[in-house]
Image (tube, rainbow, N blue to C red):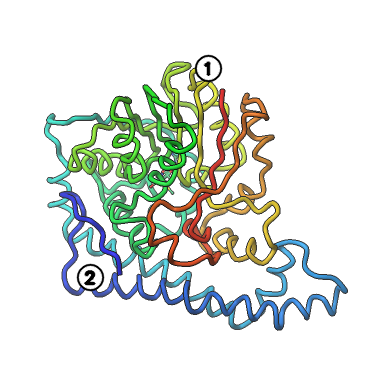
Amino acid sequence: MYDQTGHALLPRSTHDEHARQNFVQSLKEHLAMRVSPGNKSVYTRRAKPRFEQEQHRAPRDRHEVRRVMKDEPYYQTWSALLRTSQEMMWESVASSVERQLPDLTAKAKTNGRALGSLTLDPDLPIPAYHTAVDVHCMPGGYHSEGGADDIAAGAVYDRAVHIYAMGRMGPFNDDLGASLVAYLTQQYPHLRPRRILDMGCSVGHSTVPYVETYPEAEVHAIDIGAPMLRYAHARAEALGKRVHFSQQNAERTNFADASFDLIVSHILLHETSGTAIRNIMRECHRLLTPGGMMFHVEVPQYQGMDPYDAFILDWDTYNNNEPFWGAMHDLDLVELARQGGFASETVVQTLVPSAFKMARARTQLFQGGDFGGGGQWFVFGATK
Ligand SMILES: C[S@@+](CC[C@H](N)C(=O)[O-])C[C@H]1O[C@@H](n2cnc3c(N)ncnc32)[C@H](O)[C@@H]1O
């Protein structure tokens, strides 16, 4: 089991809370490593031959795989347990955060002594794609608040991500940012961004690696959720990192045209909508300086993927309150970038290895969820 590195804000667990959280993490690990591979055997030995007998051909896409797999008891059991583990994860962390909330809230106050900044907008409309469902079953989603100065959603997210990824996002949960930064420093060794924007930053896990790698840059990070941003600000300060957080919708921000030379996001796009993702592309184009670049990290697109792998990776669309997951992974990203104003020939689509070496060592398996890309991340980018 890999430990999460403590910082002043990280919720502390009692012995019993820790035991429950460890159980959930072990259950997730067991499902991913031991049970999930059995789905493939069930598919190859039973479901696929059944389909072939009826249709006289192999399943062509993930929808056809799903049609035959959803009736398989083995798959149903794995799926029910995975969903249950997700609900147990949030519960095991939320009750622990609730117990210590007054203490955490007090710790989160920077009392005017801050390297970076926090700007909230209580009037910001929360997009319907976040109010309609509790994304990935997180109770209340990213934006719900129990009162003034609430940081609960951020504190829950920080602990839960570590359990969700079975520790393989690294001790600071920063694997997405660290992996993209590793790619950028390798591919663009002369890149010296002056202003960087991280869209959909949550608690700033992925934002911090940019502060570390580009110390001369002014780093901004936005999110729609106030509790995430309050926690993100306090966490960044506790880690001694200067970040300017603001509560804004990435579809339309209040930054001036050409404000940034590097815009990044990490597992944001699949949590938006068909309209929003197009708005975000246009906004990235507006915000970039000429020659500036945007990069978005996700799990791989379905195009060209084995139908069975795509089916497994698509689990979240149907079972984990991620309604845009499947549609987003079907998008033609060159066309998406083009509609946003980027020239097609500048579009980059590539796989990058996870920076946290234990994630790479773990498995080449595809499984459901943000962490399901087999130890690699998919990077989609374009240049203005
Ligand atoms: C999966 S989390 C991102 C995790 C984070 N980037 C990281 O690497 O740790 C998605 C985040 O995007 C935010 N978000 C979703 N839609 C957004 C939008 N239109 N504008 C800004 N933030 C948004 C959510 O509130 C949530 O915090």
Q: Is residue 314 left or right of residue 228?
A: right
Question: Is the CB atom of the residue marked by disc 1 within 8 angstroms of ligand 1's nearest atom?
Answer: no
Q: Tell me the kind of residue under disc 2.
A: His
Ligand 1's quadrant is top left
Residue 20, percent from left and from top: 27, 74
What's the mark number on residue 290? 1
Q: Secondary structure at mark 1?
A: strand
Please determine whether, in this image, residue 192 is positioned above or below residue 372: above
Disc 2: which residue: 18
Where, quadrant-wise, is the N terminus in this rendering? bottom left
Q: Is residue 155 left or right of residue 199?
A: left
Q: Residue at x 55, y 24 (%)?
A: 285
Would you call the spot at circle 1 few (<14 residues within 10 Å), some (14-19), or many (20 or more)? few
Residue 210, percent from left and from top: 35, 36
Please determine whether, in this image, residue 42 is positioned above or below residue 95: below
Q: Secondary structure at mark 2?
A: helix
Q: Give whichever of 103, 79 is nearer the camera.
A: 79
